Image (tube, rainbow, N blue to C red):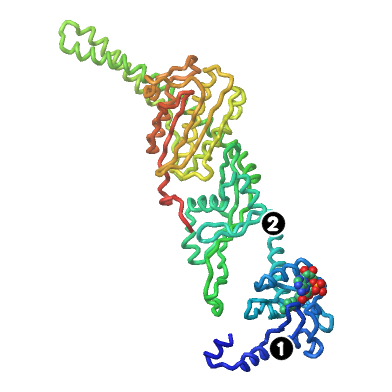
Amino acid sequence: MTAKAAQGGLSPRLFFEIVQQSPLAISITDENANILYVNPAFETLTGYDEQAILGKNESILSHKQTPTKVYSELWSTIQSKNPWQGTLVNRGRTGEAYLAELHISPVLDSNGEIRYFLGIHRDVTQLHALEKQVRHQKELIESVLDAAPVVVALIDAERRVILENQAYKKLLGDLHGNEPAILFLDALHQDGVELKSMCRKGQGFGDMEVRLDIAGRAEPRWFSVSGTWVDELDSTAGSYFSAQIKGRCCLLLVANEITALKRQMEQVRMQHLRASLAQQRRVQDMREALSGAIFQLQTPVNVIQAAVSMLDHGSDLNRTREVLDQVLTSGQQALETLRGALPEELQEIETSVNLNAILQDVLNLMTEDFLAQGVVIDWHPQTVLRAVSGRPNQLRSMFMRLVENALLAVAESGKDHRVIRVTTRSQDDGVQVVIQDNGTGIPEPVRFKVFEPFYTSWAHAHGRAGMGLSMVQETVNQHGGVIDVNPDYVDGCQMRVTLPASGEHGEFGRETL
Ligand code: FAD
């Protein structure tokens, strides 16, 4: 240092003055920590004047509350010729304790041996008290959040959870590790909540209902979700002098579980649904029976019509022609009467539909049938499913028919272990529902024929005219979807229905905030 000082033209006196006038408490000791020098700041901080402390050991400052292992580590570090830094409980001349943040550097002679130690310390008692206060407040906030019976999470712009409470962690476990916050955001996005623009405007949202379907769980869980935007404070060095610099935009999500309330409302809704489905079923059954009769009558009427036109060319068969004419007219009248008797199909408005909810209704409505037949229902909904646009009642009856078919197929198979598996999943452009059973299966030659009217292969007719799948096909067509039997599935039957996603809210793909 002397050489460098000389090069810079600075005198040793200047270095002494710098140490003397430093606001930090500086001491120089021999290799056993006996004090050789202290500066005025040291005198002020410790209360010892130079005369009283020179020759004494630094241990005079020990309050005897610092654990011995700290001193052992201090000494083994500095004796290895390395600097040491740490915090000790010190005691000034008056006996009052203070926290000292201490740096010790060994000073070596020209042989590289330790000759002196340089100690620099400052009082950090107040700083420590403040840090403790902040930590305490944080713990207090966390324990209040943890005690709250609602799910709370703070999410950053990259959809990362940066703070969560106990209820959130519990839900995370219930969802088998699927991040609840992300599921909430995906569901809200489907409901048209545009998070990016909300963040820009600082707008929050309140009490949005979110439904989460959980694999293996009979009923969905419902949450009322609210969001508030908060600016995370910028703690980088660049923002030190500027209170204006805003930090990241974070979303505080608060979700209150309302499953119990929904369950009550659901019971009432199911009663209404049962009644309206029964009515719809009556209409459909009548349509099915009359369509059957029309179909049966149409063939002989067509034959008679052909015979009449053939007779038109003969002259001696006038009487026969007259009789046939009468038969034809009465046949056509009968057809018209039957057509007139066809009840109107119940009209429904097209709306945005969650197929998980529709299928859940179907499974609930058929619970008693499953129990009676000893069938296990394996329900695998996608936790948050894209919406489709459609007519809910029509879709409900359609899926009911497919599940009823599955039920008949497992019953006719005579198997002991009877399983119907229902799966939903979002695809790029729609939603796929798979209804799979381990029943009799549909042989390859009739895989397409089963969708034709009046085709039936049930061993027992079960009072069915074979119109079920053709009506299912009609509903799928009306919804712009497709239905097929998976040819690769051999343990029974796997019906795949794909319906296009609702276009109402544009693209529902995952996005960041
Ligand atoms: P001691 O019996 O002195 O020591 C306790 C343990 O420290 C021993 O078991 C041993 O492991 C180690 N130890 C002590 N002296 C030596 C030695 N000479 N060689 C090897 N190991 C040793 N202490 C403070 O409490 N406050 C201070 O502000 C402070 N400033 C210091 C500044 C400098 C520059 C130096 C070198 C030391 C400083 N110390 C300070 C440490 C101090 O010298 C004592 O080691 C410490 O205070 C413990 O004292 P004690 O009487 O409780 O135990």
Which quarter holds ligand 1?
Answer: bottom right
In the figure, is residue 287 to the left or right of 105?
A: left
Q: Which residue is mark 2?
A: 146
Identify the residue shown where x is 60% and y is 39%.
219
Q: Which residue is mark 1?
A: 39
Q: Amino acid at mark 1?
A: Asn
**Mark 1 CB near ligand 1 (8 Å cut):** no
State the SS at label 2.
helix
Residue 460, position as x, y percentages in the image: 49, 15
Residue 201, position as x, y percentages in the image: 49, 67
Earlier sequence position, callout 1 versus callout 2? 1
Q: Which sits in the foreground, 315 or 264?
A: 264
Identify the residue shown where x is 80% and y is 83%.
56
* Image-quadrant location for residue 84: bottom right
Q: Which sits in the foreground, 262 or 105?
A: 105
Give yes or no for contact between labels 1 and 2 (Cβ–Cβ under 8 Å).
Answer: no
Q: Which mark is residue 215?
A: none
Q: Residue furthest top?
A: 316
Query: Separation of disc 1 and disc 2 at Cα?
Result: 51 Å
* Image-quadrant location for residue 160: bottom right
Q: Is residue 7 above or below residue 481?
A: below
**Do we see residue 47 in this rendering?**
no
Between tags 1 and 2, which lies in front?
1
Q: Amino acid at mark 2?
A: Asp
Q: Is residue 21 above or below residue 97?
A: below
Identify the residue shown where x is 63% and y is 52%.
168
Q: Which sits in the foreground, 497 or 130?
A: 130
In the figure, is residue 387 to the left or right of 52?
A: left
